[in-house]
Image: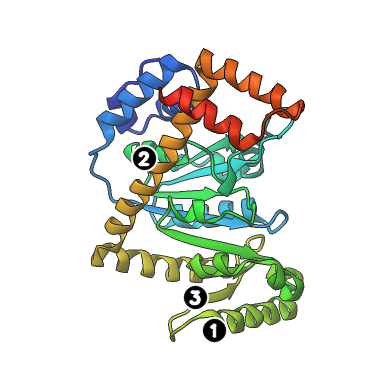
Amino acid sequence: MDIDLQKLKDGDRRTLAKAITLIESSNPNHRKSANLLLDKIKNNPHDSMRIGISGSPGVGKSTFVETFGEYLISLGHKVAVLAIDPSSPIAGGSILGDKTQMEKLSQNKDAFIRPSPSSGTLGGVANKTKETIILCEVAGFDITLVETVGVGQSEHDVANIVDFFLLLILPGGGDQLQGIKKGILEFADLIVVNKEDLNSNLAKSTQQEYQNALRILSSDDQYQQVLTCSAEKNIGVQKIWEIAEKKLLARQVSGATEKNRTEQEIRWLDKLIIEGLQIKLKTDQDCQKSYNIALNQIRDKKSSAFESAQNILKLFFS
């Protein structure tokens, strides 16, 4: 699968879509081509902003992303949206319905929407999300919005590939606040109570609850803001961007963005090594044979998972 690099840099959508399909492929030949492509664009200069958007199911992520994306485009930006859909743990399939939910945005010439299956990956992102972001930037999209699964437990993976992380929550925060882990609140750059139009008083009380919680969690006077908005009615979106843009630009000027992306690259290295080892273990015939033997031994109570794992790893590294 050959990718015309010049067409990609010129922003050709079909070439971009083809390139993303290439890097997402598990075909060994495609992987080689993908590595060559990524090597060619690794030093491509770009000035971009990467924003992660997450929240529990039903919070209105897709509606927010569409409204937010349209607003950014009205300011002159080119926006790529990577919508990560949950994959079925049984069939492995994915609904991939976000593109149909963002009908207006998908028709905008300055927007590119790419649904991708999470394929069982934790952390609310797909395996190749980071590489896909780079491809979108090479194609001229200066803002990438990563809409995540919203798994709640491992959202730090999202924060590890973006420059700014926005957490959407629903009005009525009391019980919800108890269920949200401290870490998620701490690494969110901005928290937004969506669907303000349904109950303005409830949204404002939820805003206050979260602001008080952040004040308690913070060790200094610098803690995240909590805003309210209605993505459906396009209320509060401008204020959200004003805060996000101010933080993003300040980080770019101070060098914090570049430093953060370098640290993200190192963490991604570890992730890719583990992924590569898993693929190798599954494709190596001797390892597969040992794995099947280990399964039978565990079922027959002849071996433990720990002992079997050590034996397979010894075989693999020998």
Q: Which image quadrant: the C terminus? A: top left
At x 35% / y 36%, what residue is drawn?
139
At x 49% / y 60%, what residue is drawn?
165
At x 71% / y 53%, what residue is drawn?
57
| 38 relative position to 62: left or right | left
Kindly indicate the quadrant of the structure image that contains residue 121: top right
| 115 relative position to 32: left or right | right
What is the secondary structure assignment of the residue under circle 3?
A: loop
Residue type at tag 1: Arg
| Label number found at residue 224 | 3
Residue type at tag 3: Gln
Q: Position of residue 39 (x, y in %)?
A: 27, 30
Q: Position of residue 179 (x, y in %)?
A: 71, 67
Q: Position of residue 54 (x, y in %)?
A: 58, 56
Chain-order first, disc 2 or disc 3: 2
- Which residue was labeled with disc 1? 215
- Which residue was labeled with disc 2? 134
